[in-house]
Image (tube, rainbow, N blue to C red):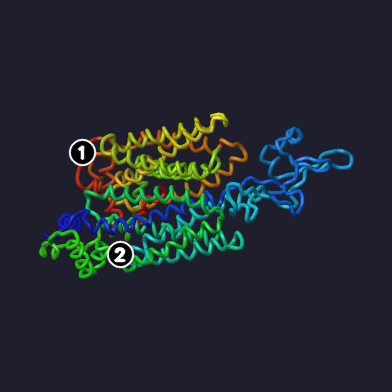
């Protein structure tokens, strides 16, 4: 009788010395993925700036805001009288006094001067992405997430077809090259093109690393392995704050987080191909050699008969998914209840990414040091993941998801109404919101993988991940609304989070229940017509999807 690859892992050690070494190497990649995901918080920050009065004026020799001929609208009563908001008065216009004594509003004809107190250089000060050009800074951030969306669609298929290792190394090399070119960009068009490519490559590297890590370990450790990579991602988040503090020129920072990736090229000689992928593609001898090496490193003996009986077939959902994708998509809308469930899950993915990245980018708008704020924002992710892991199988996916999303939404809304002189309280509530949305993001990934039936799981999860990418694309653009009303983005983040949390009430609980194989199973689960028992396959779900490589790893968190 044929045995599964998971059975072999149980025999040689589900998470022995061999897996720990390989897994740790892959986790280091996660740190650099965080650098690339969040660098725009600093490289795309907007320094304090004013219109130049003269062509040669600099921040160090800035002239007084008022004299007999021209003055800046700098929190002045004159500015108020002509109806300009604070942002316009300080940054986008000057007022020139005519001969007859009237005041004439004038654009910044000499350009802008930028403070170098927090940042010596950003893409905003480099290419004057302020005032009428401010939309370009939002676009610059969004284009990276557009690249991630494209990368998700491409690299899952490539890693399935050509193998995990060659795709991982290729994406890594292109990531390094595109990162360096971004740092050397001479104009915004060049920046956009290669930043888009960088987003694609970053997703390719992280996705394949996540899949390889999941395929290494046995079913008992799979959930822990999935969260472990996220811990390293959060560590990278925090390290970036320190790097940005020390390296305040955007070009130098981009080079610093891009060039060290060359070290990972050594993985070509260190990391083996995924044994699971080799088996599924008929390369049995290579797979057996890796399994035997793992067993030897783990100090375990392997039964040769079991090795000979090892299955080489792909999971059923992978085969059917490749041949009948169109049919599977239609199954997601086979009934009103199935369509409602699908859109509900996808909307929750969208909102989680939308709020998560919105709060991450908003750290530069909070009072105090943007570096400390960003560091704290990364710190809160560690307890968020820990709480999620500890409570998932105790409280349940559904109740936790509802609680964290509503709590995060309320925290965002409350922070929007706190007076600015209580900045410490604003920061506290926004970090509570970040904690909550990080936890809910981790939960929605597992929940979606458990709630979609086997026949549509890959395509359902794929659309879920695409929805998250759209949320990441929109979040930086929404942050531009701060110029219209400072608290508007926070109100949008909070409102959508609460709405999504309330919609989860309509979804079924998946804790302690077997994974639905068909649409009918899901409908039975939803209506509680059957009695469910915890089965081992529920803990296998992360890897069942990871084997195909068609799903996105949860690299947004």
Query: SS class of the residue under badge 1?
Result: loop
Q: Is residue 114 visible?
A: yes
Residue that carries the numbered disc 2 in the rendered image: 271
Disc number lying in front (1 or 2):
2
Q: Residues within 10 Å of mark 1 (few under 14, many from 20)?
A: some
Q: Earlier in the sequence, mark 1 or mark 2?
A: 2
422 relative to 152, above or below: above
57 relative to 166, above or below: above
Residue that carries the numbered disc 1 in the rendered image: 532
Q: Is residue 282 left or right of residue 347?
A: left
Q: Quadrant of residue 501?
A: top left
Between 537 and 25, the one nearer to me in the picture: 25
Provide residue 332's location: percent of width, then percent of height. Answer: 35, 48
Provide residue 72's location: percent of width, then percent of height. Answer: 75, 42
Provide residue 144's location: percent of width, then percent of height. Answer: 50, 55
Residue drawn 26% across the image and 55% down it: 20
Name of the residue lying farthest toward the right: 100
Q: Residues within 10 Å of mark 2 (few under 14, many from 20)?
A: some
225 relative to 312, above or below: above
Q: Is residue 467 visible?
A: no
Q: Is residue 422 left or right of residue 156?
A: right
Provide residue 334's location: percent of width, then percent of height. Answer: 34, 46
Query: SS class of the residue under badge 2?
Result: loop
Between 465 and 66, the one nearer to me in the picture: 66
Q: CA distance from mark 1 to mark 2?
A: 40 Å
């Amino acid at each position: 009788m044929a045995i599964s690859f998971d059975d072999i892992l149980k025999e040689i050690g589900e998470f022995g010395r061999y897996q720990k070494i390989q897994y740790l190497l892959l986790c280091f990649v996660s740190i650099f993925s965080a650098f690339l995901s969040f660098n725009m918080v600093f490289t795309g920050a907007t320094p304090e700036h004013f219109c130049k009065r003269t062509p040669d004026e600099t921040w160090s020799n800035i002239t007084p805001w008022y004299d007999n001929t021209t003055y800046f609208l700098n929190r002045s009563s004159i500015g108020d009288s002509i109806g300009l908001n604070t942002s316009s008065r300080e940054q986008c216009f000057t007022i020139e006094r005519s001969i007859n004594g009237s005041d004439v509003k004038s654009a910044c004809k000499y350009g802008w001067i930028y403070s170098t107190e927090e940042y010596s250089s950003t893409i905003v000060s480099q290419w004057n992405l302020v005032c009428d050009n401010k939309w370009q800074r939002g676009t610059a951030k969004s284009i990276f997430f557009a690249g991630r969306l494209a990368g998700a669609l491409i690299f899952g298929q490539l890693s399935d077809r050509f193998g995990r290792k060659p795709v991982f190394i290729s994406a890594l090399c292109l990531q390094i090259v595109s990162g360096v070119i971004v740092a050397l960009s001479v104009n915004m068009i060049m920046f956009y093109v290669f930043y888009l490519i960088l987003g694609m490559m970053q997703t390719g590297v992280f996705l394949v690393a996540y899949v390889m890590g999941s395929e290494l370990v046995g079913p008992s450790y799979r959930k822990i392995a999935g969260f472990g990579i996220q811990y390293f991602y959060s560590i990278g988040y925090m390290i970036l704050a320190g790097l940005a503090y020390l390296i305040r020129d955007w070009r130098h920072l981009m080079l610093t987080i891009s060039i060290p990736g060359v070290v990972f090229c050594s993985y070509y000689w260190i990391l083996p191909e995924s044994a699971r992928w080799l088996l599924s593609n008929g390369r049995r001898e290579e797979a057996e050699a890796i399994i035997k090496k793992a067993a030897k490193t783990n100090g375990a003996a392997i039964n040769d008969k079991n090795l000979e009986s090892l299955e080489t077939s792909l999971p059923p959902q992978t085969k059917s998914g490749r041949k009948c994708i169109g049919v599977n998509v239609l199954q997601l809308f086979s009934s009103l209840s199935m369509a409602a469930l699908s859109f509900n899950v996808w909307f929750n993915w969208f909102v989680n990414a939308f709020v998560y990245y919105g709060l991450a980018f908003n750290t530069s708008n909070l009072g105090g040091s943007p570096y400390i704020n960003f560091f704290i924002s990364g710190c809160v992710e560690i307890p968020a993941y820990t709480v999620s892991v500890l409570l998932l199988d105790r409280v349940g996916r559904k109740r936790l998801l509802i609680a964290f999303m509503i709590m995060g939404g309320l925290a965002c809304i409350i922070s929007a109404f706190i007076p600015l002189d209580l900045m410490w309280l604003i920061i506290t509530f926004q970090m509570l919101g970040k904690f909550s949305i990080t936890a809910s993001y981790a939960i929605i990934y597992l929940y979606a993988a458990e709630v979609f039936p086997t026949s549509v799981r890959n395509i359902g999860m794929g659309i879920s991940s695409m929805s998250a990418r759209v949320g990441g694309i929109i979040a930086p653009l929404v942050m531009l609304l701060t110029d219209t009303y400072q608290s508007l983005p926070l109100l949008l983040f909070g409102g959508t989070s609460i709405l999504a949390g309330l919609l989860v009430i309509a979804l079924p609980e998946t804790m302690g229940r077997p994974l639905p194989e068909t649409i009918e199973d899901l409908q039975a689960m939803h209506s509680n017509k059957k009695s469910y028992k915890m089965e081992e396959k529920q803990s296998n779900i992360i890897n069942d999807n990871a084997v195909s490589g068609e799903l996105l790893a949860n690299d947004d968190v």
